[in-house]
Amino acid sequence: MSKSEISEIVFSEENEFFPYAVLWFSYRFVLNCLFAYYLFVMIQSAFFLSIVFRNMLTKKMPKNANVFYCETCNFKCSKQSNFDKHNSTAKHRLLTSVDRNVKKSVFACKCGKEYKSRQGLQQHKKKCNIIHNESTNNNQQHHNRLNDLMKQNEILQEFIIEHKKEREEHKKEREEHKKEIEKLSEQISKISRVTNNKTTNNNNKFNLNFFLNTQCKDAMSIQSFMENLKLGCKELEHMGDVGYLNGMIDIFNNTIGNMDVYKRPLHCTDLKREVLYFKQGNDWERDSEDKQHLKKLIKNVESKNYDNLQEWQKDHPGSLQCDSRDSEHYMKIATEALGGADSNKDSIYLTKIMKHIVREVHVKP
């Protein structure tokens, strides 16, 4: 029996196994198709992989390969992996961590020569004549400056000693004057004084006697004002910064200027004529035309402010060491506390300070 005859019998509709035969042959057909597709894919993949491996094995490094260059370290390589390794080295991180935004530095000498590295510049400086000459000149200038500072310090010390003697003399004068005032106060307290000076301003009458002896009866005496005046290193340093004139004006602004009008130890009753009254002990006394009381007050405040210089020296031990920052600051403070560097302006400063005080204590009717 041939294959065709077998097929006719199997696929005959009269055969009861016909549906199963169709299902069986369909299954075999699909299975064969899938196997054929699988073989096709495997063969195609093997073909392409062989081409890729062949290229990898036969490919050579081109003659003009890409060069990776690090300007900071002067490093060259042709592979990215080697360049990445270099970037992770300690040397590269150290050189690039100084300033990543700044381009490569050029190390130049004052003679005009330039070097790529600091080491090269240092080696050159050991042999450079210009550097050696400049160093010699700098040492000479430093020596001259040191001598000048020592001379200035000696002059300042002499001036301080003289000023200290003057302060002691002023102190004795103040004590004698205080005793005289106490005696006068005892005598004056026994005598009834009546002052009827009247000042007319804008048709308003001002009773000076009533103002001083009644309204200002609890005012502080000028002696108590000086005893209670508290000045420290803060006022001393401020005077060194702003100068003698402004420093003294600020002291009076912060003391007498901030006091209650009826508590002040002095008053100006006539701004045009600059008439001043000081409370001496328990009574009010008119200042002389040349303002001796006011000048003495300014001198005493200046002396009391200067007395804090020794306290400032204790807080700054390096102030007496030449060529130090504290020494320069000390000389500036001491100079301003003594009236400023220009002694020709002493009278000008005194006049300005007195006029400022007169305006500050002027009593408006």
Image: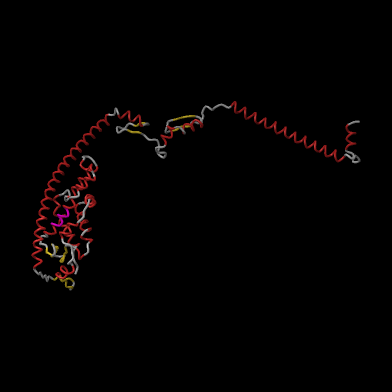
* The one of 324 and 12 positioned closer to us in this rendering: 324
Image side of residue 180 versus residue 37, left or right: left
Read off the magenta span.
296-302
Residue at (87, 39) in percent of width and height: 18
Residue drawn at x 10%, y 53% as measured from the top left: 172
Q: Position of residue 338 (x, y in %)?
A: 16, 50
| Residue 139 in which image quadrant | top left
Relative to 225, 31 lies left or right:
right
> Measured from the top left, where is residue 170 in percent x and y?
11, 53
* Of residues 292 and 151, the one drawn nearer to the viewer in this rendering: 292
Residue 203: x and y in percent read 17, 73
Q: Looking at the image, is 327 positioned above or below residue 202?
A: above
Is residue 37 positioned above or below 342 on the image? above
Q: How many marks?
A: 0
**Quarter of the image that includes the C terminus:** bottom left
The answer to which image quadrant residue 11 occupies is top right
Q: Where 52 falls versus 348 (above or below)?
A: above
Does 97 sit above or below residue 350? Answer: above
Magenta span: chief secondary structure: helix
Q: Quadrant of the N terminus?
A: top right
Q: Quadrant of residue 131?
A: top left
Left or right: residue 59 compared with residue 320: right
- Residue at the spot x=67%, y=32% of the render? 45
